[in-house]
């Protein structure tokens, strides 16, 4: 398995490029925000370095720091963007899930960007769905809490693309519009803690980890937090 990480200049979002090997088809996950150079150029450079052929862009959720470069990449390669239907509206209107006047608003103002569009091809994914793309077996886990349409993607039963659901030692925030702490707790119980310990986690921010490591050390996966007690 080839896994390349391109970290976005803004918000340090992890864009994962995944393929069976060099000179194969690949998946591009969560292309975020960059300006000089543009994030899509950084990603295309990594794709070319490994002689890969992108065939799909996976979107774990609709926050702008994970979707900003989806349109230029997906449309350049003529590939679909895969997203849960509950977050699809955020491709065209990301402000619905962000605090008005927040950091993203200021960044977009400096870019001179006020309008957003969907890629030419959008494919909606649903909970429990399994897909075979680029020779990779993907399983879809609808994991609301950070946003209503957050998903985690299982990869070949060896990796879990967790987006902003689970990080090393932390979880995604739930205080933004479209977030829900109750939904996040349900997701942690029923979608995260049910995964096998050996699964390697590829998060939306920060370093790789494993389910087993987080089960042992992540305070947000302990019963005190899951039962509604403050840390």
Image (cartoon, helix red, strand yellow):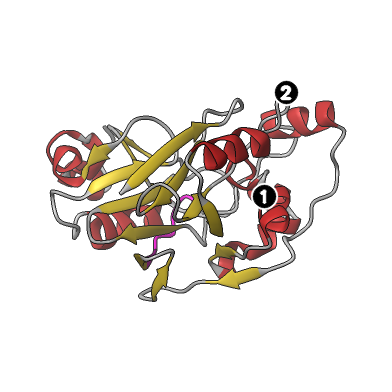
Q: Is residue 46 left or right of residue 172?
A: right
Q: Is residue 13 above or below residue 148?
A: above
Q: Nearer the viewer, residue 185 or 120?
A: 120
Residue 181 image offset from top left, x and y in percent: 41, 50
Alpha-carbon distance for marks 2 and 1? 16 Å
At x 60% / y 25%, what residue is drawn?
Answer: 9
Q: Residues within 10 Å of mark 1 (few under 14, many from 20)?
A: many
Residue ID at (37%, 49%):
162
Answer with left or right where residue 7 lies relative to residue 110: left
**Residue hosting label 2:** 36
Label at residue 9: none
Tag shown at residue 73? 1
Residue stretch rendered in magenta on the structure: 140-146
The one nearer the camera, 76 or 185, is: 76
Mark with earlier residue (2, 1)? 2
Q: Which residue does the image show at 48% across and 55% down from the upper left?
A: 27
């Amino acid at each position: 398995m080839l896994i390349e990480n391109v970290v976005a200049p803004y918000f340090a979002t992890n864009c994962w490029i995944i393929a069976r090997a060099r000179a194969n088809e690949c998946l591009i996950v969560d292309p975020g925000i960059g300006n000089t150079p543009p994030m899509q150029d950084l990603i295309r450079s990594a794709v070319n370095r490994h002689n890969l052929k992108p065939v799909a862009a996976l979107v774990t959720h609709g926050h702008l720091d994970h979707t900003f470069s989806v349109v230029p990449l997906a449309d350049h390669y003529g590939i679909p963007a895969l997203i849960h239907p509950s977050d699809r509206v955020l491709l065209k209107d990301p402000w619905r899930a962000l605090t008005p006047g927040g950091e993203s608003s200021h960044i977009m103002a400096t870019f001179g960007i006020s309008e957003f569009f969907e890629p030419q091809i959008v494919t909606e994914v649903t909970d429990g769905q399994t897909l075979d793309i680029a020779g990779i077996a993907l399983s879809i886990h609808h994991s609301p809490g950070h946003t209503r349409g957050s998903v985690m993607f299982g990869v070949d039963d060896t990796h879990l693309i967790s987006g902003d659901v689970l990080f090393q030692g932390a979880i995604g925030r739930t205080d933004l519009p479209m977030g829900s702490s109750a939904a996040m707790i349900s997701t942690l119980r029923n979608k995260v803690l049910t995964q096998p310990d050996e699964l390697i986690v590829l998060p939306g921010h920060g370093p790789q980890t494993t389910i087993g490591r987080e089960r042992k050390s992540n305070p947000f996966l302990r019963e005190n937090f899951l039962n509604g007690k403050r840390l």
